């Protein structure tokens, strides 16, 4: 009993020492981010000087050069480009849809082709058949669906507190809607935008085809127009949609992941990677998705350098290319680092927007997770209360295949406003709040510091 | 040892039972708020159909009628107006300021009179003297300040994570700036807006005079113009400001608190009050301050009624009038309920905006606080992690003088964006997010439910 108390006291003293030292460093990190931060101005430049940057586009290339130049200017130890090949799809022009019924005047619909959709090859016209859920379409029959335009009006569940859960539940209408509709002979598919507000923005995003199933055009409709269309169909089941989209696929294009490092003092061959994706959809400015994420990570490296922190391991920022429609950046990076014989001990991704921080997720072994959880106390006064199991992201996910002992982390900001702007024309710099962005950068920096100095020492 | 385990197990079972029943009610509350909520549309109407509503203004009266009519339409047990007298100040027109130096062209400054300021009586002109902190002004001398316009350029500290702390630290420049400047013979005082972003919005707010000190005009300057003015003064210390403000004080005006109730089933004479303030400053639309707060509370009563909850105590919503410049609503209410012989057991205020919820504060005895803290577990999946000591608000504060055993609660949303819009033209409906507002209403409703059913049973 005595021994146990003694041990406990020792542990507490050690822990207090740990807290005092690291509390002071974390306070410095937050001061740098909030008082002398570069995140907001860097994001402004990425959004306004370049704008949207879909893989294969001229803007994506410009963003690569912008990032390389920025990171060189910050004076990191090494800045380099990792060549990759990416898909190159363009939505083209025209991109229009309108609704007509025997009894009403024609009504223009706010649509955007889903990323990867084929063209309509001129004007495509069809009767509309609505399903409230993808499962209802799957249960339907060819006689009901054949030759029609399928309208998947499955809404995100607003009652879900975590909006990513509601998104996940609806994701199949975007990913598989075209395949399921084509199986029953549909001409085209129009999905309800994966978004929570009722507004006029169509929200695009990736979709897929299967080789054995005919390819049909696929588009997203704004939520307000979904409501309108549903009412129109209730009033008159003979509603027709006229759709024209000139989407094109070009040969795969050369592109790059952009990489910058500060070399480890003790374990330079052990890498901690943190990043987001530089590419975005071709609407808005990719401000939250994922301009905020790459800026969080670049700012983290800048802050640690500015504070003259000497990392134990090599700290590496990666701006991944092509997360949105192929993930060639993430896949190529994981294989490449394995081939290089580098040891990757941890990776963190920020790809949930630049909103007020809530915490982090950790996908690691129980010992690592326990230590990670203990950091919570350090961040009480910074409002970081989520220290949960699981985490990672699309870009860093492939590292898990190559390094079975790697621990993945995900930054978790508040999710309430994310699906207002996700993949839509409203994902612009003006919808990012300066302090929320800076607090995200400070949170990411602080965790990277703790991973390097403490968790994987 | 055995007995202890047994007790513990019993406690856990009881606690689990409590959790299961209340979890289910809280889930219903959130569903109602998020799926069938009225908060967003009600706030839109208050902001757009009425707009800003400073005490004594025609809009404030309109807001009283609007609130009475809304609450009657929701069918609460009783809806009534409590007469009060309020100050009536108007900023008038013109309201202009410009800067001139011997070497530069005149520059128009974005200013707004502080609430309660006297007029300049025509054009007032003076040399400017800048202080970086109110304490520097206090340490200065009459020979330095006399006959000049004092410019208090004390910024809010962006390094404070809780923005209300940074606000509190700067509040004296607004509240006491005129008195301190006049003590040394200044002609007028211009303060840096109590705001975090660098932009063009002046942020108004209350200020005070002292009977024994000469009254001088007081205005707030936008943060960007403060930076400009500071640079101009550095370049040329002979900078002059020309100021014209036509503020007027009218006789106190009759107005009302708006009150609605659902009567308690078991303890109708024991009251739980929850509210915010209906008045706002005369810029913007008072959307966050405090449109969101009154709407949270009205929505809470509506949700509990809709779910057919039968309260133990009387649940009373109060829309207080005149929080911004006098607090006559709060003061009159507290005295009145005491005179009525009503027993007030608890009061909650929402006056920190309609942002994503973080939790609640509680100013109560240790036993009450302990029980309150135990609710945290019920709200883990709703992201309500702040269950802290202290809380209340300006409107409900006076109740503490009349009922020493009363427990006060404050709703705590995320504070990061609050001082972007506080008391400025940017505090408009468009800057309130639907989900964030609805989640706030659900959180307030849930706590009121627990207070009634559990904490004060």
Image: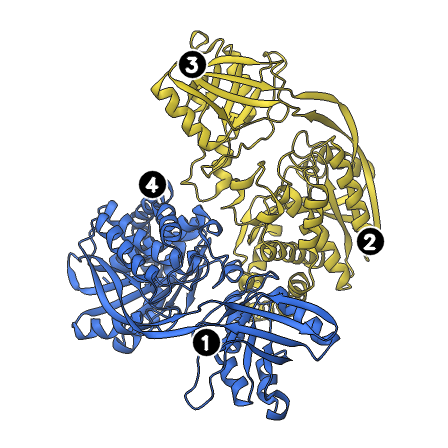
Chain colours: A yellow, B blue
Total labels: the figure holds 4
Q: Which residue is mark 2?
A: A73
Question: Element type at marker 1?
Answer: loop
Percent of width and height locating residue A455: 67, 55
Which labelled disc corresponds to residue B36? 4
Percent of width and height locating residue A23: 63, 67
Which labelled disc corresponds to residue B117? 1
As drawn, is B397 to the left or to the right of A349?
left
In three-dimensional space, the C-alpha distance between marks 4 and 1, rounded to whole angstroms, equals 44 Å
Question: Element type at marker 4?
Answer: loop
* Discs 2, 1: same chain: no
Image quadrant where residue A37 sits: bottom right
Q: Earlier in the sequence, mark 4 or mark 1?
A: 4
Task: Tell me if label 1 and label 3 are in contact, CB under 8 Å.
Answer: no
At 59% from the left edge and 80% from the top edge, which residue is drawn? B150
Looking at the image, which is closer to me, B68 or A386? B68
Q: Residue furthest top?
A: A143
Chain of the residue under label 1: B
Nearer the observer: mark 2 or 3; the answer is: 2
Q: Which residue is mark 3?
A: A140
- Mark 4 closeness class: few <14, some 14–19, many ≥20 residues within 10 Å: few
* Discs 2, 3: same chain: yes
Chain of the residue under label 2: A
In three-dimensional space, the C-alpha distance between marks 2 and 3, rounded to whole angstroms, equals 58 Å
Quadrant containing the C terminus of chain B is: bottom left
Percent of width and height locating residue A24: 65, 69
């Amino acid at each position: 009993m005595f021994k146990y108390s003694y041990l406990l006291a020792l542990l507490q003293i050690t822990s207090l020492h740990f807290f005092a030292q690291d509390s002071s460093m974390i306070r410095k990190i937050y001061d740098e981010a909030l008082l002398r931060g570069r995140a907001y101005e860097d994001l402004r430049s990425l959004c306004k000087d370049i704008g949207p940057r879909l893989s294969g586009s001229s803007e994506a290339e410009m963003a690569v050069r912008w990032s390389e130049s920025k990171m060189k200017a910050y004076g990191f130890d090494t800045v380099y480009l990792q060549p990759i090949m990416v898909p190159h799809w363009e939505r083209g022009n025209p991109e229009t849809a309108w609704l007509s019924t025997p009894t009403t005047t024609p009504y223009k619909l706010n649509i955007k082709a889903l990323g990867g959709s084929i063209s309509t090859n001129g004007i495509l016209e069809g009767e509309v058949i609505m399903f409230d859920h993808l499962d209802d379409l799957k249960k339907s029959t060819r006689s009901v669906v054949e030759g029609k335009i399928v309208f998947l009006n499955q809404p995100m569940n607003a009652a879900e507190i975590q909006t990513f859960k509601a998104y996940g539940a609806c994701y199949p209408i975007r990913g598989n809607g075209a395949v399921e509709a084509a199986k029953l002979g549909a001409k085209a598919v129009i999905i309800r935008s994966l978004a929570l507000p009722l507004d006029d923005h169509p929200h695009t995003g990736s979709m897929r085809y299967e080789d054995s199933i005919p390819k049909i055009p696929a588009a997203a409709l704004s939520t307000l127009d979904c409501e309108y269309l549903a009412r129109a169909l209730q009033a008159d089941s003979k509603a027709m949609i006229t759709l024209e989209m000139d989407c094109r696929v070009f040969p795969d294009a050369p592109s790059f992941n952009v990489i910058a490092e500060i070399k480890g003092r003790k374990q330079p061959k052990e890498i901690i990677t943190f990043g987001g994706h530089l590419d975005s959809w071709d609407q808005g400015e990719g401000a939250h998705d994922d301009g905020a994420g790459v800026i969080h990570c670049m700012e983290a490296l800048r802050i640690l350098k500015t504070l003259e922190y000497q990392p134990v391991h090599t700290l590496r920022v990666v701006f991944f290319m092509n997360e949105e429609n192929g993930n060639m950046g993430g896949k190529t990076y994981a294989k490449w680092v394995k081939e290089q014989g580098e040891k990757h001990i941890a990776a963190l991704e920020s790809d949930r927007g630049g909103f007020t921080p809530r915490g982090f997720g950790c996908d690691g072994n129980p010992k690592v997770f326990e230590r990670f959880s203990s950091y919570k106390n350090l961040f009480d006064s910074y409002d970081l209360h989520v220290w949960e199991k699981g985490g990672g992201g699309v870009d860093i996910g492939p590292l898990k295949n190559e390094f079975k002992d790697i621990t993945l982390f995900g930054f978790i900001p508040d999710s309430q406003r994310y699906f207002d702007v996700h993949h839509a024309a409203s994902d612009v710099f003006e919808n990012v709040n300066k302090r929320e962005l800076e607090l995200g950068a400070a949170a990411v920096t602080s965790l990277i510091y703790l991973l390097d100095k403490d968790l994987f020492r």
